[in-house]
Amino acid sequence: MKPKTESQKSSHLSSAVSSPVSERVVVEVVAYRPDWQADFDQEHALITEQLSSHNVAGIHHIGSTSVPGLWAKPLIDILLEVHSLALLDQETERLVRLGYEAMGEFGIPERRFFRKGSATQRTHHLHAFLAGSPQVKRHLAFRDYLRAFPEIRDEYAAVKREGARLCQNEMARYIAHKNDFILHHEAQALCWQAAEPEKGDMP
């Protein structure tokens, strides 16, 4: 497996670096809550109503709240696949009406990032990418990998809980604490996904 380049290594930290390092938020990691799926379903319906159906290729629940049994920050991460980012830009105001704040690329090229909730306690993050892009593939592969391998899910939970304990409510420190784990297992997840139908034999 080829080693990660410096640009690849920094990709998971970019959203934290784009915001003030001294920014204080509530970094709380809690046990899995079954109602997170219902929260996603509700938001999925709202977003679907607002955006042009011919531009939306998919809306996915991603991040830790999408993995049953995984400890997580109580924040719903949503992956929006679109055919045209330009058309999505034209419809940004529709998402603003749902309570989202438009943040542009926010450190990741070819992304549109939206966040919802108060400055200290976000409730939703919406990440929009072109349909089928590498960013879409890595997010979905990592999610499915954690769902498929409970032992790795639990290891990740331990890393997240430790990061929340140590970061002193600095999001950049929390993200940095998880970064090595994510980079390693995301690479494993992409290999596992590519090995289908034999992927159950990994990692």
Image (cartoon, rainbow, N blue to C red):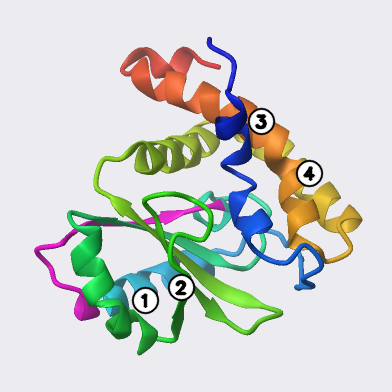
Establish if 86 lies above or below 17.
below
How far is mark 2 from mark 4, CA to CA? 27 Å
Q: Residues within 10 Å of mark 3 (few under 14, many from 20)?
A: few
Q: Residues within 10 Å of mark 4 (few under 14, many from 20)?
A: some
Image depth: mark 4 or mark 1 in front:
4
Residue 151, which numbered label?
Answer: 3
Range covered by the magenta-colored residues: 48-63
Q: Which residue is mark 4?
A: 177
Establish if 198 lies above or below 132.
above
> Is 153 situated left or right of 158 in this image?
left
For image coordinates 59% across by 15% down, the residue present is 3
Q: Secondary structure at mark 3?
A: helix
| Rendering quarter of residue 114 | bottom left
How far is mark 3 from mark 2, CA to CA? 26 Å
Give percent across and percent down for residue 147.
Answer: 50, 39
* In contact (CB < 8 Å): disc 4 and disc 1: no
Q: Is residue 121 magenta?
A: no
How far is mark 1 from mark 3, CA to CA? 30 Å
Q: Which residue is mark 2?
A: 39
Establish if 142 lies above or below 83.
above
Q: Mark 3: which amino acid?
A: Glu
Give percent across and percent down for residue 20.
Answer: 73, 67
Q: Secondary structure at mark 4?
A: helix
* In contact (CB < 8 Å): disc 2 and disc 1: yes
Image depth: mark 1 or mark 3 in front:
1
Q: What is the count of numbered marks?
A: 4
Q: Earlier in the sequence, mark 4 or mark 3?
A: 3
Q: Earlier in the sequence, mark 4 or mark 1?
A: 1
